[in-house]
Image (cartoon, helix red, strand yellow):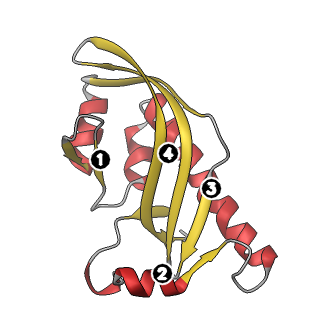
Amino acid sequence: MRLAKLTGPRAKSPLETRMTTRSVEDKEGPDVAAGEAEAIRAAERERLRSLVEKDTERARQLHADDFQLITPDGATLSKDQYLGAIACGELDYVVFGVDSPIDVRLHGDAAIIRYRSTIEVVFHMQRMALHGWHDDLGAFDPQ
């Protein structure tokens, strides 16, 4: 399962997105939606675990090819740049903890996840503690 950036022909206009937005309880009954939401939450937890454990092979499977990270200072990193920085030790997650429930919103075949986190990271040999919210948008790909 991967969350991919939603672009191209599958991307919807903001109006279409508003019209098709539903909570996890609204899709074909609560059991189906709850199952999808839990699968997305599990994939996100596994993604974070792979980053802390520096398992870049597994992280590569859990990040879409068009993944893009926007850092707290506004810099952007592609999937290859991000995972390459982890692989070479330039970026070292010591802790990447989820501090709140992972909220999942389904939009057709896309999902938005939101949660609060605590991150301890070493970047360019400088250790930083970060606390914040994550809002991630991606195509839901149950593989």
Residue under circle 2?
18
Q: Amino acid at mark 2?
A: Arg
Q: Residues within 10 Å of mark 4 (few under 14, many from 20)?
A: many
Q: Where in the figure is residue 26, as x and y percent of width and height? A: 71, 80
Q: Residues within 10 Å of mark 2 (few under 14, many from 20)?
A: few
46 in relation to 13, above or below: above
Q: Where in the figure is residue 98, as x and y percent of width and height? A: 59, 36
Q: Earlier in the sequence, mark 1 or mark 3?
A: 1
Q: Amino acid at mark 3?
A: Asp
- What residue is rendered at 46% in x and 46% in y? 134
Q: Which mark is residue 13?
A: none
How far apart in space, not on screen, are marks 2 and 4 (Cα)?
28 Å
How far apart in space, not on screen, are marks 3 and 2 (Cα)?
17 Å
Residue 32 placement, left or right of 91: right
**Residue 46 appears in the rendering:** yes
* Residue at disc 1, secondary structure: strand
- What residue is rendered at 42% in x and 62% in y? 137
How far apart in space, not on screen, are marks 1 and 2 (Cα)?
24 Å
* Residue at disc 4, secondary structure: helix
User: In front: mark 2 or mark 4?
Assistant: 2
- Quadrant housing residue 64: bottom left
Q: Earlier in the sequence, mark 1 or mark 2?
A: 2
User: In front: mark 1 or mark 2?
Assistant: 2
Residue under circle 3?
103
Residue under circle 4?
47
Q: Where in the figure is residue 89, as x and y percent of width and height? A: 28, 22
- What residue is rendered at 27% in x and 50% in y? 79
Residue under circle 1?
69
Q: Are marks 1 and 2 in contact (CB under 8 Å)?
A: no
